[in-house]
Image: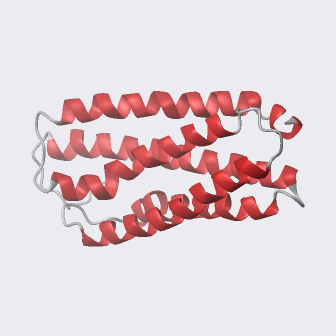
Amino acid sequence: MSGFTEWESFYLIVGGSAGALIGLQFVVMALIAERPPQHVAEGGAAFITPTIVHFGAVLLLSALVRVPWPTITWPAVLWGLMGFGGVVYSLIVVKRLKKQSIYRPGFEDWLFHAVMPLVAYAMLALSAFATDAYMRGALFAVGGASLLLLFAGIHNAWDAVAYHVFVNIRGEKPGVRRRR
């Protein structure tokens, strides 16, 4: 479909980045596994797993728009479903962030772990409805949502590594916020 042709290199870069970052997250998790902190499952469900989900969503979006669809209808339906599922998942993550006791999230944490992904998934869901009337704008919304998820994931992955290096490995008390 001609609307996607202009986006080819964008999604090659974004999808490739998401795939590489998923691989790096596995390496980091393997390194951290040597000294797991207390309540690691609770913190992982709130902080680590969503990062992989967001990277996976970006990778899936990148693959979806590269399929040679005859019309925009099916990819719009699929990214709309991803968006609705992502909104629900983001609300679950908010609940997990509030419930976990390993770390007290600050403004930056709420922004990158809750607000940005929620906005990105809402953009995906809403853009699905706009494809017939505003295809170009809908494609920009999908691209913007992909970048929001990618950058939120990059921030969150870095934050998790920094936390484990500066707090967990050094044996400091979790939950005590220090400036990085």
Query: In terms of depth relative to the viewer, which is nearer, 31 or 19?
Result: 19
Horizontal and vertical percent for residue 136?
Answer: 86, 50
Give me the residue at 54% from left, 59% from top: 116
Quadrant of the image containing the N terminus: top right
Against 171, residue 100 (above or below) is: below
The reply to whether residue 72 is visible in this rendering is yes
**Residue drawn where x is 71% and y is 32% of the image:** 66
Please indicate whether residue 16 sits to the left or right of residue 97 in the image: right
107 displayed left or right of 17: left
Asked which quadrant contains residue 133, the reply is bottom right
Q: Give coordinates of residue 170: x percent, y percent.
A: 13, 41
Q: Nearer the viewer, residue 74 or 14?
A: 74
Name the colour scheme: secondary structure
Q: Is residue 79 left or right of residue 42?
A: right
Q: 41 above or below 22?
A: below
Q: Nearer the viewer, residue 70 or 121?
A: 70
Quarter of the view holding residue 81:
bottom right
Residue 51 point in image, percent of width and height:
41, 47
Residue displayed at 52% across by 61% down? 85
Kindly tell me whether residue 180 is visible in this rendering.
no
Residue closest to the eye, 45 or 104: 45
Question: Residue 2 vs residue 105: left or right?
Answer: right
Q: Residue at x 70, y 46 (%)?
A: 143
